[in-house]
Image: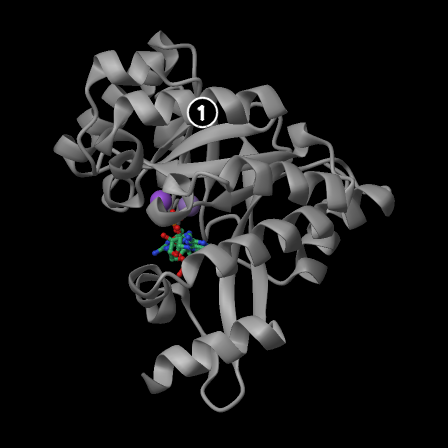
Amino acid sequence: LRYQEELRRAIAREEFVLHYQPQMDLKTGHIFAVEALIRWNHPERGLLMPGDFISFAEDTGLIGQIGDWTLRAACRQNKAWRDAGLPPVVVSVNVSARQFQEPEWVERVASALRKSGLEARYLELELTESVIMADVQQAVALMHRLEALGVHLAIDDFGTGYSSLSALKRFPVDRLKIDRSFVQDLPDDPDDAAIARAIISLAHTLQLKVIAEGVETREQLEFLRGAGCDEIQGYYLSKPVRAEGIETLLRIPN
Ligand code: G
Ligand code: G
Ligand code: MN
Ligand code: NA
């Protein structure tokens, strides 16, 4: 109960902060997007990670308000980068099951875009495989409404859930994100190498982009490049950093 009160207070006082992790196009070497990752700047406990509070927020229903804050903050920040004349990037926001199932949620995405003035094509929403597979019919309908707004859609943690290929074909998504559990033991683990290649080939067959998460080494990057992966994200490029850190990165000409 105490934690719930603290979290309510955190929402009221906006004690959250977004960190951003860059995503690089392997062909051009350009940072084309950043993933927004929430942290709770707790007054006594310091900076808390999503693992410390997101599932609790989901269980108590507070995730709706936190998710709205994230969406608005991410759109506002990206608009500020646009206005500062930085090279354009897409900001990618994680969406949890509870948010996605909320009937009013699409309106809230539209409202976050309107209020920030950010063009929809500079926003991407990351949906996890398990969320969209739970009710394919409903997910497809919702995704079409989001697509109509002009935002991009990605499937996060791909490979960890249970995707049917017939469902995958129906989703109007732009990219698959290969879960980092398949990336961490590349290039030596033959099973993970085969899985990574299979996901890349599946994505391309469906005319989707594919991004690998959790890339930490040059060897992993080179394996993925060789396997035809389009994009990477991970500590090899950068850890998630504050907005100012992204600004510095984007100013580096490449
Ligand atoms: O850096 P990292 O510990 O930040 O993130 C861990 C997990 O938390 C990731 O799986 C990510 O999907 C989730 N996460 C990060 N930010 C948000 C957010 O704003 N909303 C939701 N629902 N999940 C988030
Ligand atoms: O589940 P989701 O993919 O949204 O969460 C991203 C999570 O992965 C964040 O917690 C982020 O800090 C973490 N992460 C990002 N890059 C790396 C990496 O290269 N290695 C590891 N171990 N974790 C990473
Ligand atoms: Mn994610
Ligand atoms: Na992921």
* Residue 118 in view (yes/no): yes
Which image quadrant: the N terminus? bottom left
Residue at the spot of label 1 = 143
Q: How is the image coloured?
A: one colour
* Residue 15 in view (yes/no): no
Which image quadrant: the C terminus? top right
User: Does residue 11 sit above or below 154 in this rendering?
Assistant: below
User: Does residue 74 sit above or below 139 in this rendering?
Assistant: below
Can you give x and y, in whole percent of width and height, for residue 143 in the image?
45, 25
Identify the residue at image location x=29%, y=62%.
59
Q: Is residue 237 left or right of residue 207?
A: right
Identify the residue at image location x=39%, y=44%.
215
User: Does residue 192 sit above or below 16 in this rendering?
Assistant: above
Label 1 sits on a secondary structure element that is helix
**Which amino acid type is marked by label 1?**
Met
Identify the residue at image location x=37%, y=18%.
171
* Residue reaching furthest to the bottom: 44
Q: Which quadrant of the structure image shows residue 213?
A: top left
Which of 80/106 is in front? 106
Can you give x and y, in whole percent of width and height, for residue 106 in the image?
53, 35
User: Does residue 99 sit above or below 24 in this rendering?
Assistant: below
Q: Is residue 179 left or right of residue 66?
A: left
Which of 8/23 is in front? 8
Q: Is residue 127 left or right of residue 16?
A: left
